[in-house]
Each structure stands twice: as structure tokens, then as C-alpha cells.
Image (cartoon, rainbow, N blue to C red):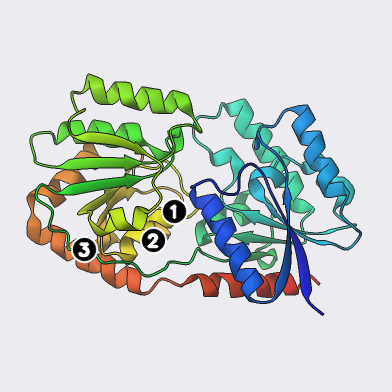
């Protein structure tokens, strides 16, 4: 008999973000392993939906038959705690946690507390949890009351792509991340201003529409610092792997990452990385493959960029370390098998 599950997700599954990219690849991988996967859209607004949207999502989930194996994206599950308390015994709920909701940047203390409480309650009603990094597993075990044996770590897979020669003249710096506060593009831009005496060109790839205020603020910052001729906000791009193949440095000043698929992609293409010591990033990026600096430290970020931009031998050695690390990363079939085994254990 074919194994079956329902995958429930908020928002638009086709969005070009790491989380949705993971979801799409996981669905594809599970189907390839013989799972019948039925999709259930939960609507927009998560993780802060209006009451009407939240009630509609609960109705979609409550319509599932008794004993259904339900894999639900944590962006929605973390705020559906009341629903989970009612349906947790009737359904076989497996949560997919990209990163805890309370760790999103820009939340007030009250919002953080609310998300922490609701997600803790919701997770307590799951039969099992899938997380995308060892760091998130540690966070859930330490601060959300989840027992380690109820967690499966399934890091994102990485596909092979063209290796960068890291020989741009001027050097090409690439940043990929949705224009939201957590991605720290403001720190990157400030750091670039501090190394404006050096030759470089920067492309920042990421949606401008998910958080329009951040996009506007970044555009104004670029203009204020006189960087319009050197920093391009390119919006979403279909082929980021082609861009990485031409990059000399990958730079992203995220304030937190549950994993950071784009860092793994940069490593797989031999591009040295400048990033922050935040969330799961140190689990992904080896020290010799670039530089990890403190969060929100534009001066330290600039110093790291300057080191790579001004020393071609250092750039090449860090690129070689990135290639070595990238060659050891798992592919998507490994991710799918890990999740498949965890799901099968719940049947």
C-alpha cells in the first residue's frame, strides 16, 4: 500500500525563499520515494494571521480524517496551538521547524513571548519534529521542552553547480536573501561604505515585496551613502546558482538563520563567505571558508570584506576551503530519506 501524508503550508509555496525552497524539494523527494503527498494551503498572513485567516486554516486541518499523517510547516503550526490541543490525539502531527518563530528579528518583547508560548504549546502536541539544522534541534531541546528523541535533523540538500574562479576584476560581491530585517542587509551596506576605497561591485538578490519598508529603507541607505553606482538591489532572480558561479565573495549579515541554504550553495560553488556568528550559520560555514563576525557589527564585517578584497592569496585559500566544505554537503536524496524514515515511524 502506498504511504500517504498531507503536507500543510502557509502562504505561497512558490516563493523564492529558503524555507519554501526546502518545502518544495522535500515534497519532490518524498514523492520520489513512493509517498503520496496531498497539499493543503493554509492561507496568507502567517505567522501573524487575522482571526478570519486563522479560523479558515484550522477548518482546513480539522477536515482531515482521523489518523491522517500530517506534516505541517512551522511558520503556521507555531501559532495553531489551540487547534493542536484539540486535534493532536486524532491526527498524527509532525511539525517542520525551519527556525523558532520567536527568533525572528524586529519583534517586540511581547511578540517574542507570545510566539514562544504558542509554539511551545503547539510543539508539545506533535508526534515528531523535523528540523533543518543541529542548531534548531538544540534550541528546541533547550528552550521549548522538546525531547531530543522526538527530533529528526534533516539539513537541506545541495545540488552541484559551476565552481567560481573567484577572479573578478573588480571583485564581485553577491548577497542573496529576502529584504527583511533579519537578513541584515543594512549592516552589509554600512560595511560596504567602510570599504568604498577599494574596488568592488555588489548585487543584492531578494524579494522587495515581502517587507516593503525594509526595501525602501535599504534603497534610501544606499543613496545616502553614495553607493548607487556600486550596489544593485536586484530583486528576485531565477538562477542564483549562475550568479554564484560569477561571484568572488558571498556576503550576508543575517542576524539569525535556522540553517541558511544559500551559505551551503555558496560553499558548493567555492565562494568564500562573510557572514555573522548567528543561529545555525557556524554549523554550515567552516572557519577557514571565510569570516564569521559578531551580529550587527558593521566594522567587523567591513574588516572581513577588506581582508578578502585586498589579499588575493587569502581570497583563493578561503575559496579552496569553501570548495572542500561544499564537496562534503549532502544532496537532497539524503534529506528526503531522513524525513521519510521519520514519517514512516509515525505510521
Q: Nearer the viewer, residue 88 or 149?
A: 88
Q: Is mark 1 on a helix, strand or loop?
A: loop
User: Does residue 147 appear to the left or right of 92 in the view shown?
Assistant: left
Residue 335: x %, y % from top left:
55, 70
Residue 164: x %, y % from top left:
22, 62
Outermost residue on the front side: it is 238
Residue 130: x %, y % from top left:
64, 61
Outermost residue on the bottom side: it is 1
The residue identified by callout 2 is 264
Q: What element carries label 2?
A: helix
Q: Quadrant of the N terminus?
A: bottom right
- Find the distance from the CA under tag 3 to the CA under tag 1: 18 Å
- Checking the image for residue 319, the label placed there is 3
- Find the distance from the CA under tag 2 to the CA under tag 1: 7 Å
The reply to whether dot 3 and dot 2 touch (C-beta < 8 Å) is no
Residue shown at 45% from the left, 72% from the top = 330
User: Looking at the image, is 306 positioned above or below residue 261?
Assistant: above
Which class describes the residues within 10 Å of circle 2: few (<14), some (14-19), or many (20+)?
many
User: Looking at the image, is 205 positioned above or below residue 40?
Assistant: above
Which class describes the residues within 10 Å of circle 3: few (<14), some (14-19), or many (20+)?
many
User: Looking at the image, is 310 positioned above or below residue 346?
Assistant: above
The reply to whether dot 2 and dot 1 touch (C-beta < 8 Å) is yes
Q: Which of 228 and 324 is in front in this view?
A: 228
The residue identified by callout 1 is 260
Dividing the picture into quadrants, the one containing residue 287 is bottom left
Asked if one can make out residue 253 in the rendered structure from this viewpoint, the answer is: yes
Residue shown at 17% from the left, 59% from the top = 166
Amino acid at each position: 500500500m502506498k504511504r500517504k501524508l498531507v503536507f500543510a503550508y502557509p502562504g505561497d509555496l512558490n516563493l523564492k525563499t529558503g524555507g519554501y525552497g526546502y518545502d518544495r524539494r522535500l515534497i519532490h523527494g518524498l514523492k520520489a520515494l513512493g509517498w503520496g503527498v496531498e497539499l493543503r494551503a493554509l492561507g496568507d498572513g502567517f505567522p501573524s494571521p487575522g482571526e478570519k485567516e486563522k479560523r479558515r486554516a484550522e477548518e482546513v486541518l480539522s477536515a482531515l480524517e482521523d489518523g491522517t499523517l500530517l506534516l505541517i510547516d512551522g511558520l503556521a503550526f507555531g501559532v495553531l496551538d489551540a487547534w493542536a490541543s484539540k486535534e493532536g490525539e486524532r491526527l498524527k502531527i509532525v511539525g517542520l521547524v525551519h527556525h523558532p518563530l520567536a527568533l525572528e528579528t524586529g519583534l517586540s518583547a511581547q511578540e517574542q513571548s507570545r510566539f514562544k508560548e504558542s509554539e511551545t504549546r503547539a510543539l508539545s502536541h506533535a508526534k515528531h519534529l523535523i528540523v533543518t539544522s543541529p542548531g534548531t534541534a538544540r534550541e528546541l531541546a533547550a528552550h521549548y521542552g522538546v525531547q531530543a528523541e522526538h527530533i529528526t535533523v534533516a539539513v537541506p540538500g545541495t545540488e552541484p553547480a559551476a565552481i567560481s574562479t573567484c577572479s573578478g576584476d573588480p571583485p564581485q560581491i553577491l548577497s542573496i536573501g529576502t529584504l527583511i530585517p533579519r537578513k541584515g542587509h543594512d549592516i552589509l551596506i554600512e560595511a560596504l561604505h567602510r570599504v568604498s576605497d577599494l574596488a568592488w561591485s555588489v548585487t543584492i538578490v531578494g524579494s522587495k515585496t515581502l517587507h516593503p519598508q525594509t526595501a525602501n529603507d535599504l534603497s534610501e541607505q544606499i543613496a545616502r551613502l553614495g553607493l548607487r553606482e556600486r550596489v544593485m538591489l536586484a530583486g528576485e532572480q531565477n538562477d542564483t546558482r549562475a550568479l554564484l558561479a560569477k561571484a568572488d565573495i558571498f556576503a550576508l549579515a543575517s542576524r539569525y538563520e535556522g540553517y541558511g541554504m544559500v551559505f551551503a550553495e555558496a560553499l558548493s560553488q567555492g565562494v568564500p563567505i562573510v557572514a555573522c556568528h548567528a543561529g545555525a550559520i557556524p554549523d554550515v560555514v567552516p572557519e577557514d571558508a571565510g569570516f564569521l563576525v559578531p551580529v550587527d557589527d558593521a566594522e567587523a564585517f567591513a574588516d572581513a570584506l577588506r581582508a578578502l578584497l585586498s589579499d588575493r592569496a587569502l581570497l583563493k585559500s578561503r575559496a579552496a576551503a569553501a570548495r572542500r566544505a561544499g564537496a562534503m554537503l549532502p544532496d537532497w536524496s539524503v534529506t528526503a530519506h531522513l524525513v521519510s524514515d521519520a514519517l514512516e515511524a509515525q505510521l
